[in-house]
Amino acid sequence: MSKRVEEMILAACRKHPEGMLDTALEPELPGVTVNDRAEALNSLLSSHKLQILVNPADPHSHIYKASAVGDTARFKGLTAEDMLVYQCIQAAGNMGIWTRDMKQRTNLQQPKINKILKALEERSLVKSIKSVQNASRKVYMLFELDPAKELTGGPWYGPDAFDSEFITVLQEATLSYIKSKGDATLADIVRFITETGISKQALQEDDVERIINTLDYDGKIDSMEDDDDGLPHYRVPLMPIPDTTAFTSIPCGVCPVFNECVEGGKISPESCQYYSAWLEQLDY
Amino acid sequence: MAEPPVASSPAAARLAFKLIEDGFGPVARDVIATLIEHGTQQYGELLRASALSAAQLRHALLVLVQHNCVNCYLKEEPPTMRGPGPSYFLYEAALPNILQILRVPRFLTHMFDEHGNDAAWMVFSLIEHGRLRWDQLAQAVREHVAGDGNEAEAEHADPDKLRNLFRSLVMERYIERVPACTLPPPPQQVHPNARKKKAAPKPGSEEETELLRGQQEAGVRQEYQQVRFSIPVELMGIGQGSAEAGASVKPAGKRKRTKEPITGGAEEPAKKRGRRKAGEAPLGCAEGRQQDEATTAGAATEVVLWRANYDEFNRRFRNDTIIRLLKDKFSATTAQAVEGMLLANARYEQTAQPAETVMLSVNDVSGALQRKHGNEGVPENVAGVLRHLSEDGLMFLDSCGSGPGGEQFKLHMPKVLQFARLHDLQAAIRNKFGPHAIRIWRLLLLNGQMEQKQVAELAMVPKEEAREALYAMLQAGYLTLQDVPRTNDRAPSRTFYTWRASSHVTIARMANDLYRAAGNLHERLAHEVAKPKPNSKRTDALEASLLELDTQLCLFSDV
């Protein structure tokens, strides 16, 4: 009898992958007493064939959800507290969750949570990721999930930090392409980057646009809207920013202590070492 | 569009002191320093504030007024119940004029290129002596030409040739009449934000009298503007002797003839001269005394003093900058057409401070180019070139419909010059703060206020480097930081900090830095020259750098 009820419950839950309430379960089990249903639910929960979760629509009630095939083996031996932490991490999705937030949501002590997380990581159920937004924070998410772009920083971040070198390479490639073509659109540049395979990750249009914008800010390209297609076109500027100016070709123009320089002071034009070095260059 | 920063910062004053000390000695420097520190002053006030002896001050003022480094005005107080109000002379440091001393070699080079050797000597003589009568100027030029090794040429120098040259320089506004020292002081400039709307004064009220007095003073100043470039008849070389004394001929099509021209000297009304106290004599107005002598001697000839008009030189340099920029940014043909606009607009301009040109038709532009360069200098399709420029996103040129001379256009000079300044500024930021800094500065300029994190993300630079660049630019005054507190206690942890770049603020800051750098460079040059064995290579390099720096200063501060 008990086995039959368990199967009935599992079948009902599989029909509702989003989970079902106890009240919704009752009509699905005609002729089954409350005690039998409770016994079957406990048995399913202890064997990890069924999960009990907080109802997202109403946090005061619970829903039952059938575990995926294979989960039973993965969760074998885990305690209710382990499962609570696991579910908490699962709910966070690919944005992950910080241990302090876990503590608040599960009402478990920090050492206990740490112990559980260690066990879950050993079983390859969860993984930890460093957030680029907060380098000191480690967030946890399910092992099989890919971290969100906000967390990893997108294609511009390497395994440890911001990948300046990759950006420089992309900038140089984009600039040389615009120079060679004379006039290029965003779609042209995206196609070029995809074809050359400079990036291991597939770059989207907005990623490439950010690279192009940096070139524009650097004054290396000009962006102008074409009258024919209404799209922005990129080309080499007719008036590039000059390499030097009268101001910056003298030591004062690039002096780090320019504002502290006073006649007769410790730093002064008469005793300026930068001027001395600059004038010495002229002697040779 | 804001006006370019005025050369009145402490850094500019510091440079001015150096230039005055170099040219006229420490006493003159002290007089200028006192005038800058205390503002416009009477002789007595100046004597007390400068702590110089009366003789020293008198001589220094004479020299400074002669060299146009100090302006002199006659202030007339309103009449009282007891009779006419007192009048006294006011002295003001002419800081913009003093700073032009640095630009003299450029003026002379320009004059040599445009009008030849004699013209360069003529301008040099005027700059060397400050202000001269025509006969003194002709003599000085002859002496210089003789000193040049062309004694034979100097002896046989055709006076008419010199006179013609002088006349053409006045017509082109390179030389101007010296303003009379009896001109009223310029009206006080009130900041636009501080201006209050006032109702029209009631008839017969004190306010109305004040208003009328202001209008009268403006009229006197306007009279000088009308004769500023007019040439006396005796210098015209026609009908000499038959012309009425004091009559003058205006440059063709430029100014109206005045009823009573103000002479270059200090021609004062006889009643004023009688009333003035001995201690308040028009000090420094040597020309005034010359004028007095001339009139008391019964000489009917007008005594006019002439000086170089720095404003005109700067106006030409400004036009060169505009033409060069348009040539680089658009094409040689566009630059040619715009040159035509600037030439056609010249007659309507009073100062080098730019504004919009007047509405100019295609015929005006073509005509101006034809007069300057002949038929070859006129592009084929001027209308088309100008129309194309007016359609550009930079909006340098406004199309104003059609008129009698064809399509009409207005050139917005401040926009072109702002673009040129920004171009230089960006190079300076990149060289001064690094390549990431220019990216960040332009990002902020184009996108407005941003938080540090956003800046790093959008500029695609590591956060640490973004922070370093931001704070370096903040310290140098090239960026501003605003705090937006979330709570009243303004706790830093609960406050947003946003960064902002403003082109006007940064350009003003750069202009100040340029003056500061020029002061430092001048100081180092003086130090190198004062060494027992000065290295000519080094001093030459420093002098050349100073001149180059001044070219940049001209763009950032004087046009």
Image (cartoon, coloured by chain):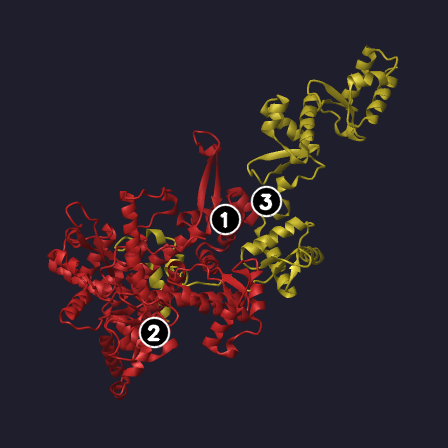
Residue matched to label 1? B465
Q: Residue furthest front?
A: B203
Residue matched to label 3? A160
Q: Quadrant of residue B252?
A: bottom left
Q: Kindly state the secondary structure of the residue where label 2 is placed.
A: helix
Q: Few, some or many C-alpha atoms within 10 Å of disc 1 (few <14, some 14-19, many ≥20)?
A: few
Residue matched to label 2? B169
Q: Position of residue B154 (x, y in %)?
A: 26, 85
Q: Between A260 and B47, which is closer to the camera in this rendering? A: B47
Q: Quadrant of residue B29?
A: bottom left
The chain letter of the yellow chain reads A
Task: Say whether residue B413 is left or right of residue B184.
Answer: right
The chain letter of the red chain reads B
Q: Chain of mark 3?
A: A
Residue type at mark 1 is Glu
Residue under the image location 27 percent in, 47 percent down: B209
Q: Kindly state the secondary structure of the residue where label 1 is placed.
A: helix
Task: Say whether residue B537 is left or right of residue A24.
Answer: left
Disc 2 to disc 1, C-alpha distance: 55 Å
Residue type at mark 3 is Asp
